[in-house]
Image: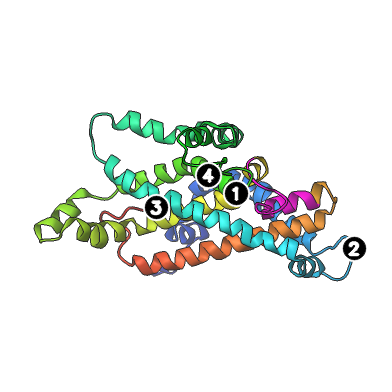
Amino acid sequence: MTAVLARPVSLRHRLAERGVDRVLLLLLPALIVVVGLFVYPMMYGVGLSVQPKNGGGALANYRAFFSDSYQSSTIWKTLRLALPAALINVGASVPIAYRLRGRFRGRRPLTAVLVLPVTLGTVLVADGLLRYLGPKGWFNRVLLDLGLIDHPVRLIYNYWGVLFSLLITGFPFAFLLVLSYMSGIDPTLERAAATLGAGPWQRVRRVLLPLLAPGLATTFVLAFVLAFSVFPSANLVGEPQDQTRVMAIAAYQAAFEKYDYSMASTIAVLMGAFELLVISVTLVLRGRLYTGPAAGGKGS
């Protein structure tokens, strides 16, 4: 009996105690894909960024980027588009999702209409903006016919044209995510708060929003990353040489106009760094807004 107890536990049993078993081998194909298509290209890009085309040291590209105001200004121009677009899309999704989370007649058709822009694509949305918000579009024609303006309002080929495009293409993603998070919150929690005397605004502020905060943070991160990598809209309905010369355009020009792939990789690495910065700040704020358990009606 003592010999049996003294027998060393096999590696398989030790791994099983830690939740590691043969089932995890099913993750191996996915791991290979992630390493081959994401990790390796990312590390290759980082390595290429520290190999300047004209020499000067490993950090020469980074110094050149930040010392050139025309290049470094693309950081602010990109953030100036991505942050408002993500905030507006998430903020507009909350009240609409709150109303649509219940069951009522016409809910499905209305939801389908709200997510329809996701099927259009960036190019088609840009073409629509050119036709409707252009100098001879219906919007300006109506205002001119009513005598409200003397000359067409410039709503495209500038910052506003790109922002409108990001709002149209990004809203369906934000709305669907917020709706799913909102639907995961138990409505009995709000009814319980109402029985305790909480008014509508108190129920939203003290019950709904704290439970929804993790989902809103995740939605904001995804919406921000989607908007931060803007490229087609900045070219088609923006001003790619000035107001909407975002980091993606700068990277494209470095790679395919100047054939400086090292500098293009540097800009791509900086894009990832700023995205990680905003994501980190968002996750920190998320942790402060909600510190409760991971279950029990939480919308995450």
| Residue under numbered circle 3 | 91
- Look at the numbered disc 3 and give the secondary structure of its residue: helix
The quarter of the image holding the N terminus is bottom left
In this picture, residue 239 sits left or right of residue 107: right
Q: Label 3 crowding class (10 Å Cα cut-off): few <14, some 14-19, many 20+?
A: some
Q: Nearer the viewer, mark 3 or mark 1?
A: 3
From the top left corner, tell me how far across and down residue 280 is, in percent. Answer: 51, 65
Disc 1 or 4, which lies upstream in sequence? 1
Choose between 219 and 20: the one closer to the eye: 219
From the top left corner, tell me how far across and down residue 78 is, in percent. Answer: 62, 56
Q: Residue at x 68, y 55 (%)?
A: 247
Magenta highlight range = 237-254
How much space separates mark 2 and mark 3, taking CA atoms?
A: 46 Å
From the top left corner, tell me how far across and down residue 209 is, in percent. Answer: 30, 58
The answer to whether any part of residue 132 appears in the image is: yes
Q: Amino acid at mark 3?
A: Gly
Disc 4 or 2, which lies upstream in sequence? 2
Q: Amino acid at mark 1?
A: Leu
- Look at the numbered disc 4 and give the secondary structure of its residue: helix
Q: Nearer the viewer, mark 4 or mark 2?
A: 4
Disc 2 or 1, which lies upstream in sequence? 1
Look at the picture and state if 127 lies above or below 15.
Answer: above
Q: Label 2 crowding class (10 Å Cα cut-off): few <14, some 14-19, many 20+?
A: few
Q: Residue lying farthest right?
A: 54
Choose between 176 and 43: the one closer to the eye: 176
Circle number at residue 31: 1
| Residue under numbered circle 4 | 164
How much space separates mark 1 and mark 4, taking CA atoms?
A: 38 Å
| Residue under numbered circle 2 | 54
